[in-house]
Image (cartoon, rainbow, N blue to C red):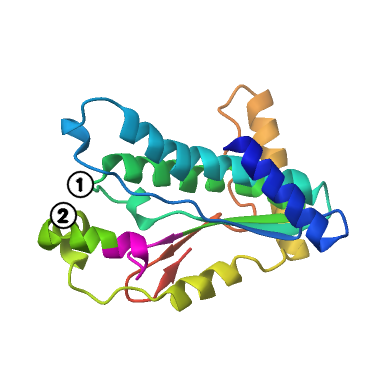
Amino acid sequence: VGEAQRRAVDAAVALVGNGRLRASVVNAGVGEAGDFLAAPDDGDARRVVDIDLTAALNGIRLAAQAMGDGGGGAIVCVASAAGFVPVPAAPVYAAAKAGLAHACRSLAPRLAARGVRLTAVCPQYIDTPLVSDLMGRANGAFARAMMGPLFGQPLLTPAEAARVIVSGLAPLSAEEVAGGKRAMGEAAAEQAAGGAGGQGGGGGSSGVLLLLQDGRVLD
């Protein structure tokens, strides 16, 4: 997967023609094929983690490398609100998306210091083929178990999700870049003093936007 992604990023940079990538949307997502606890082995769980988490992390790394140091840019990862709440019917998917959201939150100050905005957009349920497949399983019983109280509510439209994704591609302000540099300086100082380090508090954006079913966005 990693090598295929590298070729894709190289092709995008070549297409732009200036040797730099300015914006990247990392959108990788598959659902679980069955009941995690009833699975005969870890094959399906590995598939979900490989695509939903590992491939997305590779996408962040490759995009950041293609943007260079100090040149600016923006990376948006499409994660999921499933990373913030228990999802008994899809625990591996939820774990992978939680990992992606937290990786973005962790990396956002570091990239902000380099002039790159990193955002994880975490929507609830969007009207996509993945959700349509979810609705069709077991006459909707699986969807009801996974979606809980959101089952039966109107789905987000792709246009609503796109609007939030595009907002995450906005260039960082000088203040946000400075905030990222401050956050990294504070983290380095804490680490030198024997603390955990790497917290990155107070640096520009939190790195995570939660898109609720009613269209509200929480930062």
Quarter where residue 198 is shown:
top right
Quarter of the figure with residue 140: bottom left
Judge whether 33 appears above or below 77 on screen: above
Helix, strand or loop under label 1: loop
Point out residue 43 in the picture as x, y percentages from the top left corner. Answer: 33, 30
Considering only vertical position in the picture, is 111 above or below 189? below
Q: Nearer the viewer, residue 77 or 182?
A: 77
Residue that label 2 marks: 142
The CA span between labels 2 and 1 is 7 Å
> What residue is shown with label 1?
89
- Front residue of this view, candidates 217 and 161: 161
Q: Is residue 188 visible?
A: yes
Q: Are marks 2 and 1 in contact (CB under 8 Å)?
A: yes
Which class describes the residues within 10 Å of circle 1: few (<14), some (14-19), or many (20+)? some
Q: Hey, what amino acid is under mark 2?
A: Phe
Q: Is residue 178 visible?
A: no
Query: Residue 151 in the image: x percent, y percent?
Result: 18, 67
The answer to whether residue 17 is left or right of residue 120 is: right
Height in image: 135 above or below 53?
A: below
Mark 2: give few (<14), some (14-19) or many (20+) Cα within 10 Å.
some
In the rendered image, residue 124 lying in the magenta stretch gets the answer yes
Q: Residue at x 72, y 54 (%)?
A: 116
Which residues, given as a range, are shown in magenta?
Answer: 122-132
Callout 2: SS: helix
- The residue sitting at the right extreme is 18
Write the residue at 60% across / 40% down. 58
Q: Amino acid at mark 1?
A: Ala
Total numbered circles: 2
